Image: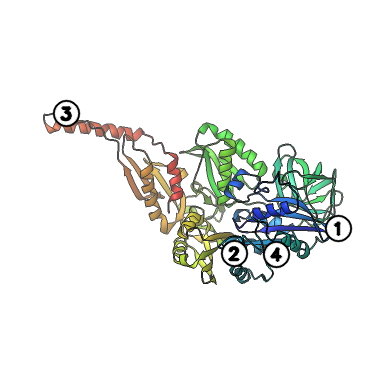
Amino acid sequence: MKNIRNFSIIAHIDHGKSTLADRIITECGAISQRLMSAQVMDTMDIEKERGITIKAQSVRLSYEFEGQDFILNLIDTPGHVDFSYEVSRSLASCEGALLVVDASQGVEAQTIANVYIALENDLEIIPVINKIDLPSADVERVRHEIEHIIGIDCEDAICVSAKTGEGIGELLARIITKIPAPKINETAPTRALIYDSWFDNYLGALALVRLYEGSIAKNDEILIMSSGKRQFVQDLFYPHPLSPIKTSRLESGEVGVLVLGLKNVSDVQVGDTISLSKNKAKEPIGGFERAKPFVFAGLYPIDTDKFEDLREALDKLRLNDSSISYEPETSLALGFGFRVGFLGLLHMEVIKERLEREFGLDLIATAPTVTYKIIQTDGKILEIQNPSELPPVNKIERIEEPFVKATIIVPSEFLGNLITLLNHKRALQLKMDYITPQRVLLEYEVPLNEIVMDFYDRLKSLTKGYASFDYEPSGYKVGDLVRLDIRVAGENVDALSIIVPNSKALSKGRELVGAMKQIVPRQLFEVAIQASVGNKIIARETIKSMGKNVTAKCYGGDITRKRKLLEKQKEGKKRMKAIGKVHLPQEAFLSVLKID
């Protein structure tokens, strides 16, 4: 057991984490060149296309060093903020971490967030400067940035190129000599941390665990500590991206996959503790919490007959991802659909894309919202995600909205543009630090409502793609908020309702009705598009009716003949307006997302 090394890789998106993992796997000879593919640890098409890691993956590698055989357990973590809880559980399963920084881009926001999680878990951190083969690589500048921002000594930081393989041998040697072996307590009752789980069509729910104490053997009865569920271990194997290796026993300090025959991933939640029924541990491993959705959106099938197909698709996706929550809801404009809770905006994009791709559905997503706390005049506290659930104004004492602490790293030339954007988003500055004369680190407190729409797109366009952004929840604060409703031809379109700050309601309403005017098709009657707060109309646009020239056939004669025809047409349009319905195209709902 003294020759086991459990380690993870921490990096910002696109700093070469998956390529480095591929190179380490190749160097250890775990996969032959014939079977090797790029991003071998990423199993989903979306991961490979976007170059991001969504699901944590692990691989057990064998490596010979100075005449001894070592076992290296590489735990690959997602880099995006939406999956930070999974990252924290993966890092809790390790003794060390590789801090990978791009030699041309330097330290970015997500790198900092994940390093702090690693430091909280008391991991041995090895700084690695990647992409040294690039012409724009500046190793000395990056060393200085790591020391200045994170406070880790980078005198002996390892310089590698995951693409060419330069420095990989030295990196493996450093992993073995610097990262400590797992601490082993053979007498204590068995405790294992679940740091990932997924669903297999043949084997059921699988739990990827790190054993802290004791051992687990095939046919043992295990106990899942949060739920008290007991289950027999049907099979055990070591993780591998292509061909998992079967084993009959997992010892303390090892990483392995348990086959329990469970039908649902929610029974083996990430962060939960597994013990043995016959010798139960007194305390679970700390830090377990159920995944909480942060962002909510309505998902509706464009073809209303596909409602049951959408329900089935969400059920199947939830087998693999227990962090999704959903409940049926109805909308007058869109029909039957689901209000779905996501971990964040990337998670929302990925789930919507998977539903459309894997299950062949065409979906409309309403504007994303967050959870608001409504303190009512009678003292009751109400939590809502859908703006249409907001109680009447006379029953509300105050509304509290969630805030996040945002970390942004940006080139100093774009600082003015960025501060203007943040002020517009009601953000409060906490810190501004010049890392180098060319790069600035900003810390702001921002309402989550302001960043769920199009904040990331605006941030990237204002900074030509150079800014990096990361956030973490920081609690609730009282806000002066109102519900902005959109009415089309006098009817309230509930799917377009949004909760906005009172100070922005007028400008937001004007922009919304202006955008809708361009999209809603002309009818045979005049259509009024109105924005309202409560019963007060604050903005209006009118779509003129499609005019038919009824006087064309009238030639000669008195003007009263023409007037008579025009009056007759006006009466007809009035009757049509009373019974007419306006069909809103999908672009109308997407226009809400583009407004700022």
The location of residue 454, given as percent across then percent down, is 48, 53
Quadrant position of the C terminus in the picture: bottom left
Residue sitting at the far right: 187
Cα distance in 3D space between marks 4 and 2: 15 Å
Q: Nearer the viewer, mark 2 or mark 3?
A: 2
The answer to the question of whether label 1 and label 3 lie on touching residues, with beta carbons closer than 8 A, is no
Amino acid type shown at disc 1 = Ala
Amino acid type shown at disc 2 = Val
Cα distance in 3D space between marks 4 and 3: 89 Å
Cα distance in 3D space between marks 2 and 3: 77 Å
Residue sitting at the far left: 557
Q: Which residue is identified by label 4?
A: 126
- Residue in the image at 46% along x and 64% along y: 414
Q: Which residue is identified by label 2?
A: 107
Q: Which numbered disc, 4 or 1, marks the residue that appears first in the sequence?
A: 4
SS assignment at label 1:
loop
The location of residue 207, given as percent across then percent down, is 74, 47
Amino acid type shown at disc 4 = Ile
Q: Which residue is identified by label 3?
A: 554
Q: Nearer the viewer, residue 497 or 41?
A: 41
Q: Which residue is identified by label 1?
A: 188
Q: Which numbered disc, 2 or 1, marks the residue that appears first in the sequence?
A: 2
Q: Nearer the viewer, mark 4 or mark 3?
A: 4
